[in-house]
Amino acid sequence: MPLAEELLGPAAAAGLGACLDRANGPRGADAVRAAAARLDGLALRERSDLLRDALLVDLPDGYPPVEAVVRTALRDPEFTGWMIWPVTEAVVSRALEAAEPDAFESALALLADLTPRLTAEFAIRRVLVADLDRALAVVEPWVRHPDEHVRRLATEGTRPRLPWAIRVPEILARPQATLRILDALYRDPSEYVRRSVANHVNDISHADPDLAVDVVTRWAAAPDDHTPRLVRHALRTAVKKGHPGALALLGFEPAADVALTGLELAAGRVTVGEELTFTFHLENTGDTPAKLAIDYVIHYQKANGRTAPKVFKLTTRTLEAGERLSISRRHSFKRISTRVLHPGSHLLELQINGVAQGKAGFDLVAPV
């Protein structure tokens, strides 16, 4: 698979220049072609920003002429793929500085027309920041749009914690502002849309798990065939954090009759780049089946000497009355870009239906 940066590389930039040549008349795409030669070494968003700025040089002044050029380009089947990202950003830039009072709404309509070619979920964030309620008045009717990409833009573009995207402070402060969109789309016929709805609720659960649980509890009371899967995906973070309401909704009641024994580590020292193996046993000492969400937590040491927990999914199982289960797992300490590993004292902890049940310490050491 190509690296993220390669998705918006010289080929995409050259294609954008060719499309702009055909749509932009004598103004052409000289700035875009010049920017295409300066993409090396830039991250994905930096590449988009560079090409956006080049587009703003090549495109005419004012919002209406820019919209006219982009709509001409939309008639070109080659105007598609990752080249669309900087185009959506240029559209928003012109609209937010426009003198025309309807440029705001016109730009949102244009983003909806562009999003099937790639996505406008990143550019729409700046419109939401500018005036959330005004933008939502345009976005909310998209839930009835015939194109699944536009319906998804309604939920994905308004996510509180959309990856790669700027934050919208008012959505973070008012997560309930987008609930009408989610309520309209949780039974959408498209898995593409439903998964976005679940991710949106999961975003909400980071700051307000009670609200997230309340929302999906309503949905669980009026489900379709896909709702149980959506609810599980929407509550994944709340479950990892041991939220009682999320666990109960998914059928994971307190496991009072489940005994944990024999938590053992294969070694008390693990070298960075290697794996930690651990084993343990669970026994249902009660007289009814127990549905279990079994997770484990690594308390990573930070640079300041304190530890920070990270929950990892292990398995879900139902233990019959009197049944005993033995589990062995390995956890990798290979270096990854999203986590810095600091040698020192660490802790492994098990979590059964959201409740910590056992722990064992170990040292992470630097390779020789």
Image: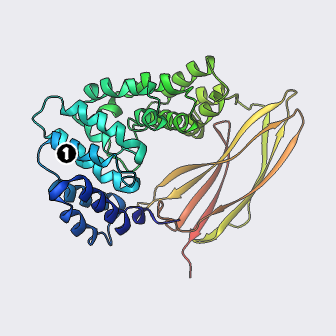
User: Taking the image as drawn, is residue 169 in sight?
Assistant: no
- Dot 1 lies on which element? helix
Residue 248 in percent (x, y) is at 65, 26
Q: Nearer the viewer, residue 17 or 46?
A: 17
Q: Quadrant of residue 169?
A: top left
10 Å crowding of disc 1: few (<14), some (14-19), many (20+): many
Residue 150 in percent (x, y) is at 42, 35
Q: Nearer the viewer, residue 250 or 140?
A: 140
Residue 151 in the figure: left or right of residue 21: right
Q: Quadrant of residue 247?
A: top right
**Residue 41, placed above or below residue 124:** below
User: Taking the image as drawn, is residue 181 in sight?
Assistant: yes
Q: Name the residue type under label 1.
A: Val
Q: Nearer the viewer, residue 137 or 215?
A: 137
Residue 65 in the figure: left or right of residue 302: left
**Residue 17, placed above or below residue 202:** below
Residue 62 in the figure: left or right of residue 162: left
Residue 360 in percent (x, y) is at 66, 55
Please give the name of the residue rendered at 34% of the width and 62% of the height, measured from the top-left corner: 15
- The number of numbered badges drawn on the structure is 1
Please give the name of the residue rendered at 16% of the width and 43% of the height, measured from the top-left corner: 65
Q: Which residue is mark 1?
A: 66
Question: Coloring scheme of the render?
Answer: rainbow
Please give the name of the residue rendered at 30% of the width and 33% of the height, measured from the top-left corner: 109
**Residue 341, placed above or below residue 200:** below
Query: Residue extending furthest bottom?
Result: 368
Q: Quadrant of the C terminus?
A: bottom right
Please give the name of the residue rendered at 50% of the width and 28% of the height, measured from the top-left corner: 212
Q: Quadrant of residue 111?
A: top left
Residue 49 in percent (x, y) is at 26, 57
Q: Nearer the viewer, residue 326 or 107?
A: 107
